[in-house]
Amino acid sequence: MLQSSESPVPFQSKKRFSTLEILQFIVLTSLILYFGKTLFIPLSFSLLISFILYPICKWMETRGINKGISIVICILGITLLVGAIIYLLFVQFIDFLEEWQSLRTKLTETINQLSIFILERFDISLEKQTDFINNTLNNSGSQAFSIVRNTAYSLSESLFFLIMIPVFSALILYHRNLLSNALYELFSPERKNTIHEILIETIHVYYNFIKGMLIVYLIVGLLNSIGLWIIGVPNPFLFGFIASILTFIPYVGIMISSLLPIAVSWITYNSIWYPLAVIAVFSIVQVLEAYIIFPFAVGSRLKINTLVIIIVIILGGIIWGAAGMILFIPFISYHQIDCRPLTKLKDVIRFIRRR
């Protein structure tokens, strides 16, 4: 695509939509996104990746590299990056298993000490404590089965996404001219320059989104490392930045990356308070990342109101889960660009845009 120097043409909508019609459209769109998430989530990630890789592919093509080869190189680079993150996660889990024997001994000692404390403080016999634990485990059997079933479904869904996202991304990049021409045909000829400008700005939006995410990972890594260093955990910067990188995988990444520093701190200091302090550090940083660091860093890059960022994160989590919390941010930025020529929405756009 070639950049256009013409400014977007204002577009006046002839039809006025009632509040009820707008609410119906929002509800219908949300239902379609929710029930079609198996298709739309990998497709949205693919669109995000293709917008990010487009300038790189275009640069390689101008250097004489074949279009298909340049796409393969870019997709391979992204695949290697994701593979490195998964490998890092796997290494963390293996290291935790190596420490498990010592950790299990510490855990057994702590449980015994807790049982003696309960016996002395509350006069509850060891037999009653054992019966209570057994009853709790028996009652939670059905819940454990449900958790295993949901985990298996999530893993299979993630595997499907990992396979389809590179395929969709490669096809979008390869057929980008056909897709852009088809998009132009949906609008009147006088709006072609406007749509072209929107596409160019959308690519810039996604680039700024990635820059904002890199800043988030850097800040989270520093906060994790400083917190672990204050506690006294060995190799705090290693554990801190590994946890920061693995936050790319929502929920699961931070949980697995915290296991090793928890085990190391418990074995090193022989006290339950150090593992609890590690959990507190990661929990506080995660809250700061979700509600302050991420909205501010990404919002400032995308020029979006911080309040809008937080609302979009919550709505994305409701509709698409963890994937929606990531994908809905650049989408709202794209839509405020897309709606900018509509003069009747200027107040809405002014609210969305960061001041």
Image (spheres, grey):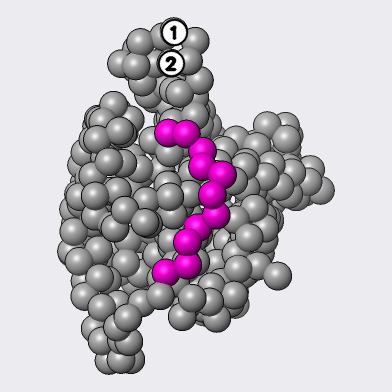
Residue 202, above or below 139: above
Q: Which residues are magenta?
A: 1-11
Determine which quarter of the picture holds residue 141.
Answer: bottom left
Residue 61, numbered label: 2
Disc 2 to disc 1, C-alpha distance = 5 Å
Circle 1 residues within 10 Å: few <14, some 14–19, many ≥20: few
- Residue at the location (50% across, 58% down)? 8
Magenta stretch encompasses residue 203: no
- Residue at the location (55% across, 67% down)? 309
Task: Tell me residue 132's x, y (percent).
Answer: 34, 71
Amino acid marked by disc 2: Glu
Q: Quadrant of the N terminus?
A: top left
Residue 103 visible to the viewer = no
- Residue at the location (30% across, 77% down)? 26
Amino acid marked by disc 1: Gly
Which one is in front, 179 or 170?
Answer: 179
Task: Tell me residue 107's x, y (percent).
Answer: 52, 48
Residue 245, above or below 293: above
Which one is in front, 29 or 313?
Answer: 29
Task: Tell me residue 205's x, y (percent).
Answer: 53, 49
Circle 2 residues within 10 Å: few <14, some 14–19, many ≥20: some
Q: Quadrant of the C terminus?
A: bottom right
Q: According to the image, label 1 marks what residue?
A: 64
